[in-house]
Amino acid sequence: MWFMYLLSWLSLFIQVAFITLAVAAGLYYLAELIEEYTVATSRIIKYMIWFSTAVLIGLYIFERFPTGMIGVGLFTNLVYFGLLQTFPFIMLTSPNFILSCGLVVVNHYLAFQFFAEEYYPFSEVLAYFTFCLWIIPFAFFVSLSAGENVLPSTMQPGGLKLGRPTGHNDSCTDLYKDPPSVRTIWKTLGLEDSQRQ
């Protein structure tokens, strides 16, 4: 009896390890796809926000969900649209990002409070959490690394919009236009004086 019990724990450990590796590989692959196709990802996230908004309105009209919970959900979707304006560049210190994180917590609190008072089957509760609370923050979370692989010359120094502003000095392209002389490089490195002695 103890041998089978030991085997069951060992098999559980192996299964959890395989599931963890599968989820990690899936997340890595998703992150790679998002980094490669940021414009398409932005469009998909926009459609997901619209879908979540339609679901919230449907829950209010057909299921009579509380006005406060639906209102906070709709306001959260507006904040997500604000995050989408600078996608894939998400500043973790921006007011939009901080507000969206706070609203995720508030939405979860309101949902737990509502579903503790009203009985719904687990599958319906899971559907609400999936479509209204989890899918959009998860999409933004997986796309956080997408902005890291963009060349710095495509970003404005003071903002996050794509394209080069007029009058902006980009040191990389300036080197191609007017390459420095060998003497200037030696002088910059402090090697010119040592060569003469």
Image: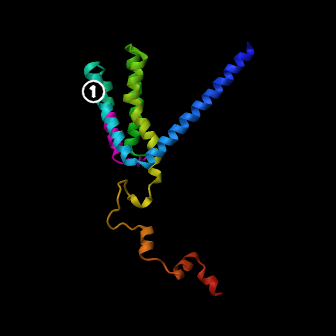
Identify which residue is drawn at 64% across, 24% down.
Answer: 12
Instruction: Point out the stretch of residues depicted in magenta.
Output: 74-91
* 176 within the magenta span: no
Instruction: Specify the quadrant of the image occupied by residue 139.
Output: top left
Q: Can you name the residue that lies furthest to the left here?
A: 61
Percent across and percent down for residue 108 are 41, 27
* 89 within the magenta span: yes
- Mark 1: few, some, or many residues within 10 Å (few <14, many ≥20)? some
Q: Quadrant where the C terminus lies? A: bottom right
Q: Quadrant where the N terminus lies? A: top right
The type of residue carrying mark 1 is Ile
With respect to residue 187, does 144 lie above or below?
A: above
Secondary structure of the residue carrying tag 1 is helix
User: Does residue 92 appear anywhere in the picture?
Assistant: no
Percent across and percent down for residue 100 are 39, 37
Instruction: Specify the quadrant of the image occupied by residue 136.
Output: top left
Depth check: 22 or 124 in front? Answer: 22
With respect to residue 186, does 117 lie above or below?
A: above
Percent across and percent down for residue 195 are 63, 84
Instruction: Specify the quadrant of the image occupied by residue 4.
Output: top right
With respect to residue 122, does 98 lie above or below?
A: below
Side of 69 relative to 151 (left or right): left
Q: Main secondary structure of the magenta part?
A: helix
Q: Which residue is mark 1?
A: 57
Identify which residue is drawn at 30% across, 31% down.
Answer: 53
Identify which residue is drawn at 36% across, 66% down.
Answer: 168
